[in-house]
Image (cartoon, grey):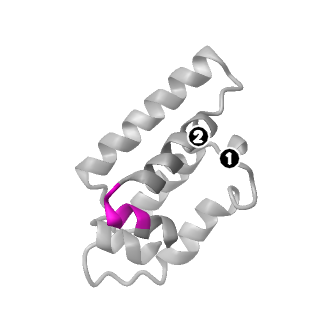
Amino acid sequence: MANDFTRLGFLAAGTDVSPIVPALEAIWQDSAGKGLADFNFRSVTGKFNQLVYNYPIRIPERFSLVIRSLLTQEGICFTLKPDFKFLEVAYPYVAKRLLTDPNPALRERLIQ
């Protein structure tokens, strides 16, 4: 994942990712082994925000807008229905999109 951050523009090319790997593992550790219904996007992004301040990570604009919209949608859902599981509802759409989109890059990401 740390190397993907470089490829996606979160880290500058040539950045030593070795100190970032344990920090990323710590972020995802609480989510490992949990079902989709138990995933809390806001919690993960909160931990990721701390990572941004401790390491030379920058959020490309296109990703910050997506993250912001997801947090807004999750917040609205929790306000209207506190036990609503945002990703549980979104998962079928995402899976269908990955499986049926004609873009070979999406299918490759699914395989990875």
The residue shown at (39%, 72%) is 4
The residue shown at (48%, 74%) is 20
Q: For residue 24, which numbered disc appears in the image?
A: none
The residue shown at (40%, 78%) is 3
Question: Dots 2 and 1: beta carbons under 8 Å?
Answer: yes
Which numbered disc, 2 or 1, marks the residue that appears first in the sequence? Answer: 1
- Tell me the crowding category of disc 2: few under 14, some 14 to 19, or many 20 or more residues within 10 angstroms, Cα based: some
CA–CA distance in space, label 2 to label 1: 6 Å
Is residue 57 visible in the rendered image? The answer is no
**Position of residue 74 measured from the top left corner of the image (x, y, whole percent):** 53, 30
**Position of residue 37 measured from the top left corner of the image (x, y, whole percent):** 71, 41
**Disc 2 target residue:** 87
**Disc 1 target residue:** 36
- SS type, badge 1: helix
Three-letter code, disc 1: Leu
Q: Which residues are magenta?
A: 102-107
